[in-house]
Amino acid sequence: NKNTDDIGVCTGTTLSSLWNFAEFEKGAIVDGPLFTDASLFPGTVVNAASSQVSIRFNIQGFNTTISTGYSSSIDALKYAIDFIRLGRVKAVLVGGVESLSLPNFIGFYNLGFFAGINGEEVSCPFDKRRNGIILSEGAAVVLIEDEEYARQRNANIYAEVNGVGNFFDAFRMGKYDPEASGLKNSIKEAIRSSGLGVDDIDYISASANSVPEQDRLETKVIKSVFGRYAYNIPVSAIKSMTGEPFSAAGLFQIAGAVGSMYNSFIPPTINFQERDKDCDLDYVANKSRIARIRNVLINNFGPGGSNAAFILSKWN
């Protein structure tokens, strides 16, 4: 309860308020505006999650919600990092959250993004059988803080923020940029700002979600940025196990990357059975792999134009 004006909250989310919003609007239409359920109203706004965190923990620094679709939680992380580097706050709780509801399901279904519409209902990134996503939900939260502040409070430091890049490449509504230029530029900027070389990246946590074009484009970009070294870097997609958590994906991947560093293993891309000629990298197929991990590249992108890349390094 003390000195919380130098702590912030920043959450990445896009769809988490849709259920409340839909139920509130349905009540207004069916029963009339005088008989709507007032308890639903606070949850109808996209910043509800961030606000509830600040209320619960009496955090009085800035409170922000980033809603940029697939890259929301990495964009939220970038926002928090910038505030810390500017000296505005010492620490930020950064969250990625998404909840599953009927409106979300209908939206993705109408866009034709679901696995099972045109093939087997399975999440199999990079596999030739891939035909769409398995929609999921969840939340993850990390505390980003200034190194000096972390040392002062004897914090258990898990990892170091080493580089971030986020670029926009809008093409058409619900469509991918054929060259994935935004993802390519995001990865290049993350590497440049980290001071690392392409041969310093030990593992790539992919954004691949079993959408045919997405997985193909991510493979293409990795080969473009890393050149021949791309074939030496393990690449895996945790969405083969978690499904597509949309805005929460980046924080899921960060949590997984920290686990990889401290337990010396790379999580697998499960359900990988049939190789696609356009996806020809090392995808850590079906079984985790023991490995010494120091630097992880995390990718986030999707149709619509938002792209982000983040490099996380093990803390010495």
Image (spheres, rainbow, N blue to C red):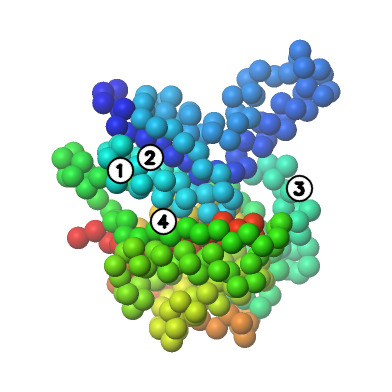
Residue annotated with mark 2 = 93
* Labels 4 & 2 near each other (Cβ < 8 A): no
* Labels 1 & 3 near each other (Cβ < 8 A): no
At x 40%, y 83%, the residue is 229
* Image coordinates for residue 152, horizontal then vertical, percent: 16, 40
Farthest-out residue, top:
34
Q: Residue 187 versus residue 114: which sits nearer the camera? A: 187
As measured in the structure, the alpha-carbon distance from the residue carrying label 1 to the one carrying label 3 is: 42 Å
Nearest to N terminus: mark 2 or mark 1: 1
- Element marked by disc 4: helix
Instruction: Inspect the image, locate mark 4, and give the three-letter code of the amino acid beneath it.
Output: Ile
Residue annotated with mark 1 = 86
Above or below, 302 relative to 136: below
Instruction: Inspect the image, locate mark 1, and give the three-letter code of the amino acid beneath it.
Output: Leu
* Image coordinates for residue 176, horizontal then vertical, percent: 65, 65
As measured in the structure, the alpha-carbon distance from the residue carrying label 3 to the one carrying label 4 is: 29 Å
Q: Residue 288 versus residue 178: which sits nearer the camera? A: 178
Above or below, 141 relative to 217: above
As measured in the structure, the alpha-carbon distance from the residue carrying label 2 to the one carrying label 3 is: 31 Å
- Element marked by disc 1: loop
Q: Crowding at label 2, few (<14), some or many (≥20) Cα neighbours within 10 Å?
A: many
Above or below, 179 relative to 263: below
**Quarter-of-image position of residue 240:** bottom right
Nearest to N terminus: mark 4 or mark 2: 2
Which of labels 1 and 3 is toward the front?
1
Instruction: Please indicate, yes or no, whether residue 290 appears anywhere in the rendered image.
Output: no
What is the number of the mark on residue 254? 4
Residue annotated with mark 3 = 106
Could you tell whether 106 is left or right of 244 in the image? right
* Labels 3 & 4 near each other (Cβ < 8 A): no
At x 24%, y 50%, the residue is 157
Nearest to N terminus: mark 4 or mark 1: 1
